[in-house]
Each structure stands twice: as structure tokens, then as C-alpha cells.
Image (cartoon, rainbow, N blue to C red):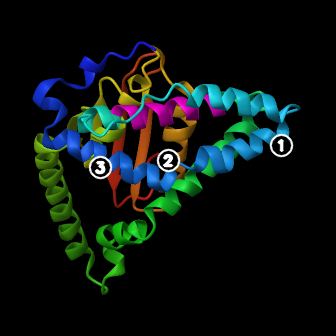
Amino acid sequence: MSTNTEEFGSGWEKWNPQAWVDFVTIKLMMAKVGDVIPKTYMPILRLVSEDAGKVDEGYHQVVSLRDPVRFLDSPRDKWRKIYGSYVRELEWVYGELRQHFLQEEYEELVVDIMARTIRGAMGSLLPSVEKMTRPENDAPIQPATAATRKSRRGKLVEKVAARLMNHLNPVSAIVGPVEMKMNRGQMELYIPRCWMHTAPGDGRTQDRACLEGCKAACEAVFNGNTPVAMLFEPDLPEYSCTLTVRMGEGIIN
């Protein structure tokens, strides 16, 4: 293990509001999706493997790499240990499953499971987002009024998003620092060094966790199913990524 903990901050940065937000976010996230590895992916891997005992041994070896989360650890260190372990184990189980399926079958399997898990974790939030962003859910209105409301909503989203990013980054727990800009009615988040790759601390990109567990699964959840469309463009083998978010359009072409 070669974790460079300085990348995630030092001193006050380990205890500041953003560190606490990231720690609480990842704790809540793990309560919802953390069991997908031992309770869903691992049983499938045991079924398709010739030696289930060897599979369990490999999984225990990966789990043994977890850093113990101590009571006196800073919220930033707790976040790093919890999130890094999850990504490391997700990358491992995806690599093992990939050996037993054709590429298309493998992608369909792991992405569908993760997308269903994310949908279940979000619960009633998706309908709430839809209600907030689709004017047609309200009483019938004239096209001109709808366009005006859409324009006002877009400006409001831009102002709120900019204020959030300047003070507390709501996606920091997953990807780390971002650079945000609005471009032709859509939000672009540039992630210069995604923490999904660096939190595990093994000095390499987490390609399968990134492409299937994050990009493909999140796009499956949002694109075509909600009015919040997302497009992830990872720059593998680099650590950077661009996330494009469009409100009220349904899907990004």
C-alpha cells in the first residue's frame, strides 16, 4: 500500500466542514450500497467459480487490507479508510467476475446490479427530483410561460450550484475537488484527480470500479429515467474525468 494521505489534506483540512460532510456522506452511502459486494457480487462469484473456497480466500485477503477506523481518527482519515476499502474491494470483485463471463455479459451483470442498488439507495429522491424539474407535472401552462420558468430555473440552479461548490462540495466524498462551469444550459464538472482512483492507495487507477461501478451504473440510473441526465467521460489511464449534468432534458446525446 502506498497511500499518499497528504493528497486528502492535512491539519485543519482533516477536520473542516468539508471533511465532516464527506465522512457522513460515505457512512450513509455505505449503509445503503456497501453490502452489494458480500451479499450480491460474492455469491454470484462463488456460483460461477470452480473453487468457492479459493474465492473466499481471495476476498478475505483483499478485506485484510482495510485500515482500521479508530475513534480518534479525523473525519478525513475515516472517510479515506472506508471509501478506499470499498473501491478496492469493488475493483477486485469486478476483476474476478470478468474472468467468468464474456465482456458484454459481464458488463450487463455488474452494471445492472449496481444500478439497481443505487436506485434502491436513493429511494423516493428520484421522484422528488422529477417533480422539481419537470414543469409538465404542474398544471397546464402556456409555452411562453414554460420557457420563462425553465430559464429562471436554470439561472437558479446555476447560482445555487456555484455557491455550493464555493463553500461545500456535495460530490467531494466520491470524486474529490471539482471545477464547475455552466456551458449552454448544462453543468460541467471537471474532476482533475478523482478520489475514487486515489483513495484505495495502491498507486493505480481503479478502471473497472470507475467504468462499470460509477460511470455506467450512474448513467443507467439517470439517463432516460429521470430529468437529470449525466454523462461521465473518464480520461483513463489518467485520474481526471469530466461530468456533464443537464437538468430537465432526460438524456444526454
* Image x and y of residue 106, in percent: 72, 37
> CB of mark 3 within 8 Å of CB of mark 2?
no
* Image x and y of residue 142, in percent: 26, 81
Report, in whole angstroms, how far the alpha carbon at label 1 lies from the one at label 2: 28 Å
Q: Find the magenta span and give its range.
A: 80-94
Local packing at callout 2 (Cα closer than 10 Å; few below 14, some 14-19, many 20+) is many
* Quarter holding residue 108: top right
Assess whether residue 209 is covered by the magenta stretch.
no
Report, in whole angstroms, how far the alpha carbon at label 3 lies from the one at label 1: 35 Å
> CB of mark 3 within 8 Å of CB of mark 1?
no
Q: Is residue 200 visible?
A: yes
Residue 97 vs residue 141, the one in the foreground: 97
Q: Is residue 144 above or below residue 185?
A: below
Q: Secondary structure under badge 1?
A: helix
The residue that disc 2 covers is 219
- Label 3 sits on what residue type? Val
Residue 127 vs residue 65, the one in the foreground: 65
Report, in whole angstroms, how far the alpha carbon at label 3 lies from the one at label 2: 24 Å
Q: Secondary structure under badge 2?
A: helix
Q: In the shown orientation, is residue 196 left or right of residue 36?
A: left
Disc number placed over residue 24 in the picture, else none = 3
Q: Is residue 184 visible?
A: no
Q: Residue at x 39, y 20 (%)?
A: 239
Which of discs 3 and 2 lies nearer the camera? The answer is 3
Q: Residue at x 12, y 52 (%)?
A: 159
Q: Residue at x 14, y 46 (%)?
A: 162
Which of discs 1 and 2 lies nearer the camera? The answer is 1
**What predominant SS class does the magenta segment belong to?**
helix
Assess whether residue 87 is covered by the magenta stretch.
yes
The residue that disc 1 covers is 47
- Label 1 sits on what residue type? Leu
- Label 2 sits on what residue type? Glu
